[in-house]
Image (cartoon, rainbow, N blue to C red):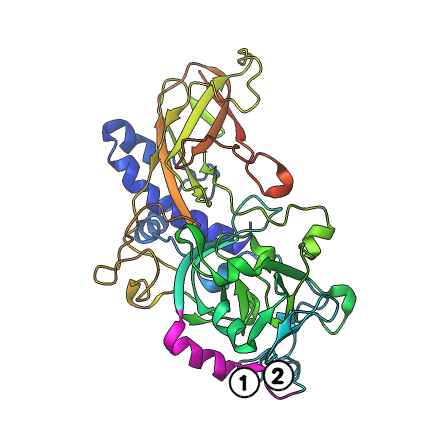
Amino acid sequence: MKPAIAKFLLEHTALTRRYFLGCGVAGIAAVGSLPLLADDRNRDPKLQKSLDALESWLTDPDEFRDVSRGKPLPHSLPEDQRKEVGLTRETWKLELASDPDNPAKLGSPLTKENNTALDFAGLLQLGEKHAVRFAKAMTCLNVGCPLGNGIWEGVPLREVLWLTQPREDLRRIFYYGYHNDDPKQMFRSSLPVGRVLEDPFDLPPVILCYKLNGQWLSPERGGPVRVVFPEGYGFKSIKWLTHMYLSNLFYANDTYGEQNNDVDSPLKTFCATLSLPAKVKANEPIPVTGYAQVGISGLKKVQVWVQKDGEELPPNDRYFAQAPWSDAKILPPPEVWGGGIADNRIPPSTMGFDDETGQPTTWPIRLSMAHWATLLPGLAPGEYTFRCRTIDDKGIGQPLPRPFRKSGHSAIEQLPITVEA
């Protein structure tokens, strides 16, 4: 098991213990059967003490799961080579120019040739006035589990776009990062200019990001500067940013689009389990815990359903909308945020948080993550299938409203349980 996943499961176990301890006698008994790292090993008392002290919602920057591209990976280059190619804060420069194939009219493109490319000091100067911070789960379109949850900080892309003095014929922006000077390794993404200039539905802005959880963005996380697109999947948040082109192109030209993915699909709401005993004794309560990714449609409920194998399913109900689901508990904000943030305080002026209390103004926070737990009643001996799903803010059950795999994971998880006499 990878260290990052193991630590996340440890933290999750500590967070959910409070829920079960509040469920009375049955819940206290269930705490003892919570699996460590999703297996059935008995916990050492010293380890349990550590678990009780861990409650993390944010992911430590060093422990995000990594699906980076490149041979070699850009963040693995020696520091002197990273300096040479502009992948340090001292040497980074960003070019914003007109697309030569579908040109937009710009009054002042930012280019190295004209000595006008944006450097890191210039970006921070913009940040003194315009910097924003917001929570976001970073998720790969083709991976079910989020890669990590963080507070991302940077300058809205529109503030940099306006420096180029755009005039007309501007419909999209496409961009890419360092790719070992090998065109075959280029990974490109794009956005409509309207989304860059305006933030609909109370969404955070698209940013040029330079901090994660209050710390400088590391090379592993895409530093010195990357794009972060709040409601998008990870392929829209290009790492090691070097070039942006303002274009009159009317369609997306993303690398992922060429690989038969839905590149315009925003983050979906879905849930999955983290701990579920594979075998239990008859008539004993069953503790189950999990996480939810809170997509653009928000999160109202997490629901669970246990079906005895062999029982007939309702006909013509592909997504189990008519199943006898029951509500699980979405856990409240944690006492310890984690992620390495200073003094256990969410950075000031973070969108969605109150500056005086440091607490979220709503919960769960859209575009981030939440934990959930439930205590299932005891079952008769037999073989069962456990399922969980989310209900979004409009009352729509997972995997709807967008069940198609190419637009991101949303399938209902199905796990076996054996109940022994």
Q: Is residue 409 left or right of residue 209?
A: right
Above or below, 228 against 91 in this view is: above
Q: Distance between the residues labelled 1 and 2?
A: 8 Å
For the point 59% across and 85% down, which residue is it?
Answer: 116
For the point 47% across and 40% down, which residue is it?
Answer: 269
Q: Name the residue under label 1.
A: 90
Nearest the eye: 286 or 239: 239
Q: Where is residue 201 in the image (x, y as percent from the top left)?
A: 42, 50
Residue ranking furthest to the front: 168
Q: Where is residue 334 in the image (x, y as percent from the top left)?
A: 30, 50
Confirm whether residue 211 shows in the render: no
Closer to the chain start, of discs 1 and 2, is 2
Magenta stretch prevailing secondary structure: helix
Q: What stretch is highlighted in magenta?
A: 114-131
Residue type (three-letter) at the residue carrying disc 1: Glu
Residue 83: which numbered mark, if any? 2
